Image (cartoon, grey):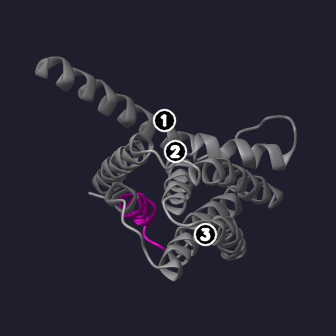
Amino acid sequence: MAGAGLRRRARAASACAWLLLASTGASAHLPDTGLGPLADGALHLFLSFDDLLAVVAMAVLASQHDEATAQRAAGALPAAWLAGGLAGFAAGKAYLPASATSLSLIALGVLVAAGRRLPRALVTALAVAAGLAHGLFNGAALATARHDGMALAGIVGAALVVTTLIVAPGLRLQATGARIAMRVAGSWIAAIGLLSLGWTLSGRL
């Protein structure tokens, strides 16, 4: 039984690593859906694993709190993402180390796994920080690749939809099993953040 459990964990870790590598390549280019920059930007979020996981982690963290805190964080994340994206697009650079997005995954994942109630202001601040960091990188990447700035609106819109789809039902999940599942998901997000951080740092050696 123990051996089977280890094999399952190994397969899961391998899958996560593969997704990270795939997302690294996907984030370098905006996908061409043929439906315009808005759709291209929206799809980009789902192909950029670090961005998508940051949205999921922040939404789950918000849903572990009361409704007012969750709603404020759910609104702050895409708003900050848009602000950061506009700043990155205008500057053409993110002004942050490449490891910033990996560190955000680690921090959010650990907080979700801990399952502790945090002050409302802190949850909002975390949403703003995550949105600004990821938005800066998105905006800078779009500017560097000379993509249409409207793609940023697609990314932000997708982030808003994902956040809402997680927070709304998450607030109603009060069963112990559901709460434990959230915390387990947080631990996996933190682990993926560590893998991403290692990959980023190894590329700079």
Q: In this view, does 182 lie to the left or right of 149?
A: left
Q: Which three-letter amino acid code belongs to the residue tagged 3? A: Ala
Q: Mark 3 points at which residue?
A: 73
Seen as rendered, the residue at the extreme left is: 2
- Under circle 1, the secondary element is helix
Q: Earlier in the sequence, mark 1 or mark 3?
A: 1
Of 4 and 23, the residue lying toward us:
4
Residue 32, quarter of the rendered image? top right
Q: Are marks 1 and 2 in contact (CB under 8 Å)?
A: yes
Residue 12 sits inside the magenta stretch: no
Q: Which residue is drawn at 56% across and 76% down?
A: 124
In this view of the protein, can residue 92 be seen by the observer? no
Q: What residue do we see at 57% from left, 55% from top?
A: 55
The kind of residue on which mark 2 rests is Phe
Whether residue 196 is situated above or below residue 132 in the rendered picture = above
In this rendering, would 190 be left or right of 152? Answer: left
How far is the residue under mark 1 from the one under mark 3? 29 Å
Q: Mark 1 points at which residue?
A: 22
Quickly name the residue at label 2: 49
Which stretch did the figure color magenta? Answer: 96-108
Can you say which quadrant of the picture contains the C terminus?
Answer: bottom left
Magenta stretch, main secondary structure, is: helix
